[in-house]
Amino acid sequence: MGFFDFFFGKKSEMKVTKNKSIEPQAPAHFVDLAKQNSDIVDGLIFSATCQVRTPLNVLLKHGEIYQGNDAPPTYGRGAKDGIWLPKVRSDYSYDNDGNKAASDAGHVLSDDYIKFAIGLRTIFESNLPTIDKMEKIINYGDNLDDKIKYIAKNVILNRGGSKGEEKDNLADVMANHLSDTERKIWYFDKPNHLNIIDGVNKKVVESLENNGFTTMQKIAELKVEELVILDGIGKVSAKKIAEDCLNIKELR
């Protein structure tokens, strides 16, 4: 099968793996294509997934060229984090405006997104304390060029939570990628996040908020006996809630 036949025809020959978690990062048909069309294809090029969840070490591999005979290396968690694509020789490339990619910021230039994501993940994966890194992330992009600001704005708009809640800033987006403990540390003194406390459900959250206990910080000052008297909170739940909030207070 010729190079252009591969991309513009015979699509039925392409097999899609249903389980994305095991989808290969270097699909055999792309590897074969590169080998069989060396006059048009100059090896493989790595394309990192344009999502804020993509690890920094994988983002840094974006654009890497592979021209070996064996299978190229796997970076990150397989196709979830990136894919090896045939690299068309410049003489045959019709993309003069740069490569665009689907991303959690919409359809943008991949190089712009990778620049944005590398900066963001550099902060996120740093050894800074949770609060410090998240405060840096809130302001990330403010002093960068308009392209990066545009991407940051659209990531915030597009990355709703699992229940569709709106995100106010990049820290809200990246909080989804923190550990449970780190997330509680970050939201400890912030309202509207009681649902992350151990032992709560929607009814308990409403009861706490209706009684003025809108943050984990406020709840950490309560004793189990004070929680039990609130509507919908039993002894077991009260103990879990009190212990969880107190533990996070000590970690801060």
Image (spheres, rainbow, N blue to C red):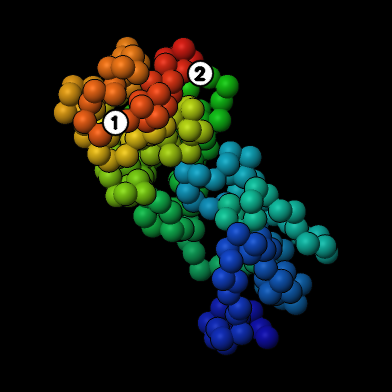
Mark 1 vs 2, N-terminal side: 2
Packing grade of label 2 (10 A; few <14, some 14-19, many >=20) is: few
The residue pinned by badge 1 equals: 233
Q: Secondary structure at mark 2?
A: loop
Quadrant in the picture for the N terminus: bottom right
When the figure is inspected, residue 72 is found, relative to residue 113, above or below; the finding is below
Residue 121 can be seen, yes or no: yes
Disc 2 marks a residue whose amino acid type is: Pro
Relative image position of residue 159 (x, y in whole percent) = 35, 47
Relative image position of residue 37 (x, y in whole percent) = 72, 76
When the figure is inspected, residue 125 is found, relative to residue 93, above or below; the finding is above
- Tell me if 165 is positioned left or right of 111 in this view: left
Camera-side residue of 139 and 97: 139
Disc 1 marks a residue whose amino acid type is: Ile
Residue 4 can be seen, yes or no: no
Relative image position of residue 251 (x, y in whole percent) = 49, 15
- Tell me if 75 is positioned left or right of 223 in this view: right
When the figure is inspected, residue 174 is found, relative to residue 184, above or below; the finding is below
